[in-house]
Every structure is written in structure tokens, then in C-alpha cells.
Amino acid sequence: MANRLTIDRTREKAQISRHIYGHFAEHLGRCVYEGIWVGEDSPIPNTRGIRNDVVAALRAIKVPLVRWPGGCFADEYHWMDGIGHRENRKEMINTHWGNLVENNHFGTHEFFDFCEQVGCEPYVAGNLGSGTLQEMSEWVEYMNFDGKSPMTQMRAANGREEPWRLRYFGIGNENWGCGGKMRAEYYADEYMRYATYCRDYPNAKLYRIAAGPRKDNYHWTKVLMENAGMYMDGLALHYYTRLEDTSMVTKLPDGNARYARNPNVKSYSATQFERKEWDIVMRESWFTEELMTRHSAIMDAYDPDKKVALIVDEWGTWFAVEPGTNPGFLYQQNTLRDALVAGMHLNIFNNHADRVRMANIAQMINVLQAIVLTDGEKMVLTPTYHVFDMFKVHQDAMLLDHNLLSDGFEVDGKTIPQVNASVSRNAEGKIHITLCNVNPENGAEVECFLDGIGAGSNLTGTVLTSDRMNAHNDFDRPEDIKPAAFTGYRTENGKLTVEMPSKSVVLLTIG
Ligand code: AHR
């Protein structure tokens, strides 16, 4: 059967928020230290301690937003330790990630400077798990108040007169797990208490984000929406694509769940894998479609006007760390398989743009499904980076109504679509179609039906693929896999036929 994509150019369904193309940077391994921050005295070219090559790479793909400082780290971070003269900053132990000494050299001022250099929105996650309400409230005052107060005087003494006017603020992280092992009912109450004292200041209205569910914990979504939905702007889901679920889940009679790490689960390599592992990763990645649909349906029941965004705060692949690296640093390589996972997720998020208005891949640099890897002064762009580069055309564009009938791709008795897609029109009227063919052996013919398409249409294409499932870029071969011009399509009146290679991500631009 041919795959058929029917596009209705007259029907715009929603605007695709550029924040769907967001990123997550935690004080974990070499993400912040080395990946972003090298210090002013480093031989690595930097601007006020922030490395120039990374900033340029992030600007090139129009990174719209970065979430910081964690993750689990956020719920043990005390922001006052990270301000003032760097040599006087208090050290702490990063107990979640390797028990390393954190010198707090990258703090609030450095984070905002980084965002200004990248040209992106900051998203700060506050400490509800181990911090006090006063501490969180004062952080917001420090960042956002434009008047005279103890916090703003401290800010000025630290070199910043003007408030930053932060918009996106998270109230805790994974509070069902590393953020305090709370029940949904307890967290909902705590959320409201903390959110109340995170004030809106003049010209600085906060967009409050509640810690959302783990994966398919629908109870959490229901309880949060029922009790606190009217006091939040976003609910932040976390879901990682893995070969095995590494958590042991105990369901409690009241609907809550307890999570514990399963010590017996094998870790799978990011680069050394067989066809079977490719397939399972595709299946687990496609599970995101179900998560978006089912969590959105619960939210619809309490919030039919879709005021509260479903935010996919952390997503991406989670494999074994590279051999010989610190297990607490979560450093993994990134292959064509990760690129397919990225393309699939971004297509899914685009297609749910009416409810999904932010998503942050975990994590930006040197951790999990990174877009950038560094080794001292060297930097390499991963296949996932190239997908974000190709898909950036969807940022703030209008999602066009479309219907895709795809061949199936069977994985252990479960069938997922072989091809996934999303379609948008940007402000200049250009239509962009992004397509992923998850089959690592077979190509896919996709017939696209779009009114007005024909021989005279102005069409260009880009493809990311390789003859190897595990193609990846490394410091000695930085361009082993990169996007190339794509011409595998033909047009007839009203129909565009695309011949997708196996295991490929394709971008088509019309107009
Ligand atoms: O991204 C790594 C960790 O995964 C984050 O710190 C945490 O929020 C999640 O469990």
C-alpha cells in the first residue's frame, strides 16, 4: 500500500509554538560545566565565560528556550549560593549526579547572560523539594522586581540593576520522585502554596509550570488538573525513550504510584545495537503519541478552553553511558536512531500544538540525547542537532490540517506507523512537510495530496539518512552524518510523490 498524506491548505488547526523546540540544561555531568561554562580564563574562546562555539551552534538552529538548573538538581539547588563574587560562592555536593563538588560558578546571572547570548527565553525551575517557600519567593523577586527591595538591592550589588523579567518558572521537578516522593494530592496543595508566593511583579507576569506526571501516570494529571488547574499555566510531563523501563512501579490503592530504580535492568548501548533494538526504540518513542492524546483528554475534561499547556519538560533517549565515562554523567553518543526519535517526537508535538505548547529535549549538551557534544575545545553536532535544524521552519508556523494513512511497522506484535509527518505554513506562506520513515530496511513511497501542487510548484527538499543505523558524528569524524539536498520526489496535478529512503528524515518546502 502507498502511504497517503492528504493536506487541507484551507484549514489551520493551531499555531506551533516555537517553544516546542526548547531544550533542557541541568547541572549534570558536562552539560553546564564545559558544555556551556568554561570560565573567563579558559583558552576555549568564550564571552564572559560562556563558550562561543556552542552559542553559535545554538543560535544557528534558533533555540527558543532553555530550562535550567534541573531536573533533580533543581530540587536541591539553593540559588543564593550561585550569586556574588565567584570565588566567594559556596560549594555544594551534587548528590544526584555523581556526588561531585558543585562550585556554583554558573548561577542566575550567568544563566541569563547565556540566554541573552543565545537569543532565547529562560525557563527557571525552582526548588520545592528541599527549599523553603521564602527562598523560592525571593528568587522570583530577585529576578523580576523593578523597585527597591532587599532582593533588588542585592541584585544591583551583584551588577544587575534591571530585572530580567523571567516569564517561565517551574514550581519543583518530578515531585513524585527525586523532588520529594509526594502523592499527587499533597503536591497539588504544595504547588498552590508555593505558586501563590511566586508573585507577579509589574511588567513581569509569571507563567507558572507545575511538575507533571511521569509517563503514563494519568492519576497525577487528573488530580493536578482537578485541584490546581486554575492556578497553573502549564503542566510538565516527563517521558524518556528507553529499551527497558528502569523503574519498578508500585501502584497504591489511592491511585498514586511509587517509583524505585530497578537494579536488574540491563543498559543498552547508544551505538552498538541490532535491528531488534532499533525497532523497540521506535515503538517506545511512538508511545509519546498515546501519552499526548490521553493526558490531553484528561486536561480537556477540566480545561476545555485549553488554557493550561501540556509541557513536555523532559524527553529523549536514555541509553548506557559511553564506555569508560562516569556513570553519573549520563554521557551517551547519538546516532541516526536518535535522529528518528527526535523527528518523530517533533512531528507528534506539532500535531498536538493545540495543547502542547512547550517541549524540552534532555539534554542540550553532553547528556542523554544531546544536540551538541564537546571534548575540551572540540565540539561536534549530533544527528539530533540536524533534525532540530531541519524542523526549525515549523517554529511559530500554523499547523495545517492533514491526514496520514501509513503502512504499519510491526514490533513484537504491536504496530506503529512506518511513516509519521507534520505540515505547517509559515508567515511567508511557505508550506513545510516533515516526514520520518522509521523502517531501517525499506524505503517508503508517500503520496501527498495538496490542492494546487503541480509541475510549476517551487519545491526543495532536505534529507538526513545513512546506510548505517548507527551512523554518528564523533570528534575524529564530525560530519559522518549530516543533512543533504533531497530530490526524490515528483509532482503531478494535485499530487506530490515522495520516495523516502529507509531510516530517513525528510523536509520538503513548497513555495
Ligand atoms: O535528565 C536527567 C534526569 O531525568 C532529570 O534530572 C530528572 O528530572 C529526570 O529523572
Image (cartoon, grey):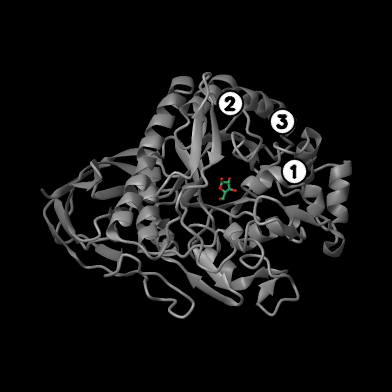
**Residue 407 seen in the figure:** yes
User: How far from the left and from the top, in percent, is residue 286?
Assistant: 34, 44
Quickly name the residue at label 3: 194
User: How far from the left and from the top, in percent, is residue 218?
Assistant: 46, 28
Residue pictured at 42% horizontal, 30% vertical: 296
The nearer-to-camera label among 2 and 1 is 2
Determine contact: label 2, label 1, CB under 8 Å: no
Mark 3 to mark 1 CA distance (whole Å): 16 Å
Compare marks 2 and 1 and give the one earlier in the sequence.
1
Compared across the picture, whether 417 is left or right of 202 comes to left
Q: Amino acid at mark 2?
A: Ala
Numbered disc total: 3
Compared across the picture, whether 432 is left or right of 148 comes to left
Q: Amino acid at mark 3?
A: Tyr
Quickly name the residue at label 1: 144
Picture quarter with the C terminus: bottom left
Question: Is the C-beta of the residue carrying label 2 under 8 Å from the nearest atom of ligand 1?
Answer: no
The nearer-to-camera label among 3 and 1 is 3
